[in-house]
Image: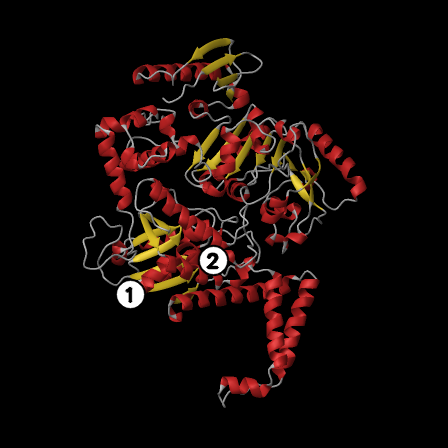
Amino acid sequence: MSHMIQVKINFNKERSFCYYNKKGKRIRVYNGNNFNQNLFPNKEKNLDKRKSLLNLLKTLIENNLNYSSQKDYNLNEDTRDIFYEQSIFKERVPVKLFEHPKIGSKSVALEIANLIRDKQSKGKSCVLGLATGSSPISIYSELVRMHKEEKLSFHNVITFNLDEYFPMQPNSRNSYHKFMFDFLFDHIDIQKKNINIPRGDLNPSNIESHCVDFENKIKFAGGLDFQLLGIGRNGHIGFNEPGSIESSITRKVKIEETTRFDAADEFAGIENVPKDAISMGIKTILKAKRIILVAWGDSKSNIIKKSVEEKINELVPASLLQSHHNCIFILDKESASSLNRIRCPWVYTNINKKPKNKISSSIFGWSNINIKKAVIWLSLKKKKPILQLTDEDYNENGMGGILEIHKSAYVTNINVFNMLEHSITGWPGGKSNSDDLNRPERSKPNKKRVLIFSPHPDDDVISMGGTFSRLINQGHDVHVAYQTSGNIAVSDEKVLEIAELIKRLTISLSVKDLNKLISNEKTKIEKYHIIWGAKFHDSLKGLLREKIDLDGYSILNKIKGIIRKSEAFQACDYLGLEKDKIYNLDMPFYQTGKIKKKELSNADIEIVQNLINKIKPHQIFAAGDLSDPHGTHRLCLRSIYNSINNLKSKSFMRNCFVWLYKGAWDEWGIDEIDMAVPLSPNQILKKRRAIYKHLSQKDVVSFPGQDKREFWQRAEDRNKNTAELFSELGLAKYGAMEAFKRYYF
């Protein structure tokens, strides 16, 4: 190893820690016997001896856990393995990974249900701390299902919600009070008197006493048996924003600007997002007997890494959970993707040793895929082209096992270099009359039917505008399907701008002028168009001024959808795509008029499936990124996967390649890329102009996350960065590259 990690185990009956002493890094282990020993597993270069020391470490931890009260902490075999992995990968809080958020949500819901039933069997109340946001929705959905189908009763449950906006009326569509009733309370048999949600409708002078009363209610109930948490992109838990101190209790807080910006569209503009909230404090949260934090999607991966692997830092509030004795992070593979166990496990453990369980999705075994991932990581870490890596580089970074397979760095380097080189192509639809053995796409058929799925009306050009254009220019039969209208990303101001234009056109152009413009004697413009144009604009202003009723929202959202469809049509027309090859699917799950969407239904899947079956494509391009802030991409991708699964027995599907692109928020890792399409300066410019056609998304991005750049800027920087990484690895230097990962079904 290039560095030494000292492991110091210091057990005592009151508190126990496992220290990774590079210097002072620690991981908590449960209470146990008094014990002191120093271990140096990673200093030992002899692999067998190092394994022996690591096994000793595991035994010490397991013995300590066995001594602990299993009744209090539910320490089963899986839990012991979690703590062992935690130790190996230098994680400061236990982590459990799941293949899919739905599976993880069911696991959390089952733990809550078991706790409720256990308390019921003892005649006790079950006190739950609950969270809002997108992450817990599937958990609440599963609890509702268990209530209806498995007779899970909530009659003994007392709940305390983390937070609420201030000011905020309980019946407001943006209130967390309404959220909880919509997703949970209205569907279960909980006693209304047992529901406690911070109030956002108080007189400011009464807030302090309300917060004190809230804390007292928790104490009177016996404290929180269980606390469910989500995590913000800045690390906030509840509305405990960066800088919140560990001793904080329920109080009025200021909401950070980035958090308000993320909520802007839900409130029809950041100016309408409350600047304050009432939130349970860090101290109150940490008093819970059990804490589970859930996070889904790779947009959370960076903050998860900071919370799990770095030292406690009040600027990352979630990191304060490291001090809790019974807390676990429930993650999917995407949200855990930046953790050491996923990013570079070979540095910390022998990846040829198969894990005893499926808790971790750590890389196992030196397959070609894992070798590619490791060599790319090593090349970038050492800042050396792949072909210049040495045996010493491999051995010093835990990758000696690769040399046992390939005998030398020289052979490994060439193999990985060729993998990368063969992924680069200027023919995304395949190059006709050529050897395609080392190309990502087939040469036949020469002309392919291509179906591009775009979750929103601009994802296609943002993510693969250059490839889109090249497929058309190279003679392929290209079709594009917009899965949703994307209407919620259009600001009210943009609608008024267009309405103002319509008003000016109808007032300024005479009936005679309009009839001349149309040049059709059979179609005459009547004078009433002037009245209509003016009233259209004034009515919209009135609706917006009055914050719009439900019917008004429906009409407004329809107009916004039309705007985005028009923009998409213009972008496709600019790229040279015929209008009869453009499909607006308007999938039902999206049609809520709000950021929060419905669950994916059979109707959604049927729409996608029917289109695939109609076109019978040789290529499908789909958004494979799961980083969009509100989960639309995830649902759109799932609809495609389900459709493919239903159709895969069809003969045409056996000749169909599925290529996944990433969106505006992220890019594939170099090790994940199966096809990289270089873009010339002219193609970059053409792509930018196609993005410009989406004027409603220009200048102000509705869902920027923490990235304030416009979409065209993100796309160009991302494509440029991909090209630069290929160059750093020792391959040809291009100005920009669009990247794709193949999905095998």
Measured along the vertical axis of the image, is residue 69 above or below residue 260? above
Say whether disc 1 or disc 2 marks the residue closer to the N-terminus: 2
Q: Which residue is mark 2?
A: 456
Measured along the vertical axis of the image, is residue 172 above or below residue 217? below
Picture quarter containing residue 349? top left
Picture quarter containing residue 547? bottom right
Secondary structure, mark 2, is loop
Q: Residues within 10 Å of mark 1 (few under 14, many from 20)?
A: few
Q: Which residue is mark 1?
A: 475
Most foreground residue, 637 or 111:
637
Most foreground residue, 145 or 161:
161
Q: Is residue 359 visible?
A: no
Measured along the vertical axis of the image, is residue 298 above or below residue 605? above
Quadrant where the N terminus sits is top left
Residue type at mark 2: give it.
His
Q: Is residue 139 visible?
A: yes
Q: Residue furthest right?
A: 205
Where residue 486 sits in the image (x, y, percent)? 51, 59
Secondary structure, mark 1, is loop
For image coordinates 39% across by 45% down, the residue present is 668
Q: Nearer the viewer, mark 1 or mark 2?
A: 1
- The reply to whether dot 1 and dot 2 touch (C-beta < 8 Å) is no
Q: In the displayed structure, does residue 230 sit left or right of residue 574?
A: right
Q: CA distance from mark 1 to mark 2?
A: 25 Å
Most foreground residue, 181 or 253:
253
Residue type at mark 1: give it.
Gly
